[in-house]
Amino acid sequence: MTIPDTSATPVPRDAEPIKAIPVRHPGRWVAIAVIAVLVAMFVHLLVTNSAFQWKFMFQNMFTPPVMRGLVGTVTITVLAMIIGVVLGVIVAVARLSNNPILRGTSWAYTWFFRAVPRYVLLIVMGNLGILWPRLEIGVPFDTYLGKLFGLENAHWRLFGISTRELLVGFWVGVLGLALSEAAYMAEIVRAGMMSVDPGQDEAATALGMSRGQALRRVVLPQAMRVIIPPTGNETIAMLKDTSLLIAVPVTAELFFQLSAIGNRTFQVFPMLVAAILWYLFLVSILLVGQYFLEKRFSRGYGRADKAKMKLEGLAAEHGANPELP
């Protein structure tokens, strides 16, 4: 038996350390330099330009009328979104209904209110008194029905109210924004409901739930993950669109009060800057709330959660306990 000669086998040497050369990104430094220069120019503008009138602006942006306008803006936003969301859910459910009349009516609603600009809609609603000086409840077409029976000037009405008393600025603004918002919310809710697996609805029905119960307990809770982010964006847009209520006009509104101070004192631009600061503050609060809502309704849909759910499902199929090592 021959023994192999290992004397000629090369002895392995220690590997030389790898000299890692970082990738150069000259474009990043150029972008940083350009942004730094622009920021410096903007700060210089804020500090040195006398047109801002910072002292005058801060003295007037916290006055009682402005604070009342701030409360009015927040109140209008909340009321318009509540009405818009509720009405939007109803329109979305009607849009997904098997009834062709409900589908057609809901489609016509979303088509109309998405097509008309909110500013134009608010102006029209503020002038509805031109069409109906009074709103009355009674028998429809009473005058024409009276003529059929030989009665002239038949007025079979229980009571009525003048549109000047009913269509005051605040409620016209809330109603106009809410009707417009409902059209957008209907599409958001419809998209969220369609994102849910149809098998979920079928399973709920098989368990004996009615269609309404399945919608409330199964479909909508799962659709909230898709509905919440665009609804947060719509709330932010609604807050900003309250400035359009100057078309009605609504005096208990933030932008109206700031504009009134600027027009009265001939310092329009500083009060416009004050409006920007107020809206930045309010929107920042809404963004924080939107973040936590999205986090709350997105539980179980992140990468780690999806992997955990998949692991638990595989373990359940094989009768194992995923918690054990």
Image (tube, rainbow, N blue to C red):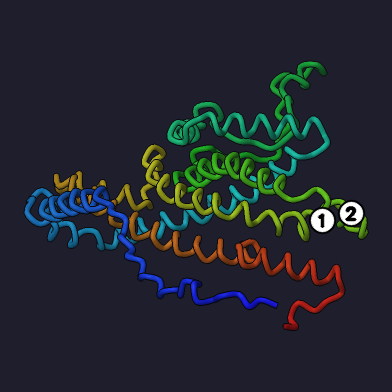
Q: Is residue 261 visible?
A: no
* Between 179 and 137, the one nearer to me in the picture: 179
**Position in image of residue 118 (x %, y %):** 47, 36
**Quadrant in which the C terminus is drawn:** bottom right
Tell me how far mark 2 sits from mark 1, CA to CA: 7 Å
- Pointer 2 local density, CA inside 10 Å: few below 14, some 14–19, many at least 20: some
The reply to whether discs 2 and 1 touch (Cβ–Cβ < 8 Å) is yes
User: What residue sits 60% from the left and 63% below the top?
Assistant: 302
* SS assignment at label 2: helix
Which numbered dot is residue 214?
1
* SS assignment at label 1: helix
Which numbered dot is residue 304?
none
Q: Is 62 left or right of 294, judged from the image as shown?
A: left
- Amino acid on which the number 2 mark rests in the picture: Thr
* Between 190 and 160, the one nearer to me in the picture: 190
**Position in image of residue 46 (x %, y %):** 14, 54
Q: Is 209 left or right of 246, judged from the image as shown?
A: right
Q: Is 324 left or right of 233, judged from the image as shown?
A: right
Q: Which residue is mark 2?
A: 205
* Between 33 and 257, the one nearer to me in the picture: 33
User: What residue sits 82% from the left and 34% below the top?
Assistant: 99
**Position in image of residue 188 (x %, y %):** 61, 45
User: What residue sits 58% from the left and 54% below the top?
Assistant: 82
User: What residue sits 49% from the left and 64% below the top?
Assistant: 289
Q: Is 115 left or right of 195, judged from the image as shown?
A: left
Is 181 drawn above or below residue 1 in the view shown?
above
- Amino acid on which the number 1 mark rests in the picture: Ala
Question: Which residue lies most toward the bottom here?
Answer: 324
- Pointer 1 local density, CA inside 10 Å: few below 14, some 14–19, many at least 20: some
Q: Earlier in the sequence, mark 2 or mark 1?
A: 2
* Between 169 and 220, the one nearer to me in the picture: 220
**Position in image of residue 311 (x %, y %):** 73, 68
